[in-house]
Image (cartoon, coloured by chain):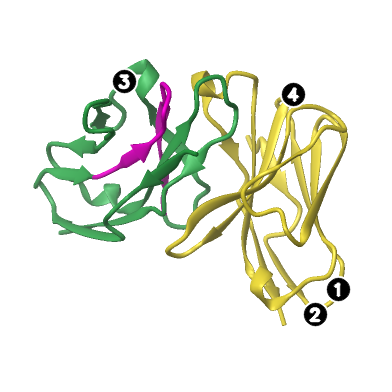
Chain colours: A green, B yellow
Amino acid sequence: AQRVTQPEKLLSVFKGAPVELKCNYSYSGSPELFWYVQYSRQRLQLLLRHISRESIKGFTADLNKGETSFHLKKPFAQEEDSAMYYCALAGFGNEKLTFGTGTRLTIIP
Amino acid sequence: DVKVTQSSRYLVKRTGEKVFLECVQDMDHENMFWYRQDPGLGLRLIYFSYDVKMKEKGDIPEGYSVSREKKERFSLILESASTNQTSMYLCASSPPATVNYGYTFGSGTRLTVV
């Protein structure tokens, strides 16, 4: 079975401070990991994928297989980062995503 | 620019009614999915489909069924709506190899069962 854990339901950070949203996973094989974001009144959208090792809107995430983690980080928070963030996992060769419970990030001006 | 369209943004139905939620995508994607989104529970997969007329159960299929007669359309059916099915329902689609592209989501249908 595969599982994604996001331990923080709510996270508040001051503008300009670093942000880290935690994501841990449980999967016996090689996982494919994603971060999705939902801004207020907008649809859920892909933020980044670990396979592409990209940085989107200043966010990065590194897969740590030893700690089974895929934490999302940004060095300097901006007000427009306030949103709901979901970590998601797909098993190798599997088309379906398992999502975590989400973290609501609020940036304090 | 809308690529995954859910026919209703809000629905209110009575307990026991049969409810149809419709989803259409215009990206010629093979994969389509239905999730429900609840506070504190995240997104949970109800059903998914890899191809026309093909369907597979997700994690919480009880009380739901699906239909995929055409590639672009994936319908979620609540056979007899109950109050515990009050939720936000999200449809998504993806091409093969989700890992490379991720999902494209619809804007959601907020269903209230009274």
- Find numbered disc 2 in the image and state the secondary structure of the residue it sits on: loop
- Find numbered disc 3 in the image and state the secondary structure of the residue it sits on: loop
Q: Name the residue under label 3.
A: A54
| Camera-side residue of A3 and A98 | A3
Q: Name the residue under label 2.
A: B14
Distance between the alpha carbons at the discs numbered 1 and 4: 32 Å
Pair 1/3: label in front: 1
Decide if residue A32 is on the left or right side of residue B49: left
- Name the chain under label 2: B
Magenta range is A22-39
- Find numbered disc 1 in the image and state the secondary structure of the residue it sits on: loop
> Residue A58's x, y, as percent?
23, 31
Q: Name the residue under label 4.
A: B28
| Camera-side residue of B24 and B98 | B98
Q: Tags 2 and 1 in contact by the CB under 8 Å rule?
A: yes
Amino acid marked by disc 2: Arg
> Residue B84's x, y, as percent?
65, 73
Mark toward the start of the polypeptide (1 vs 4): 1
Amino acid marked by disc 3: Glu
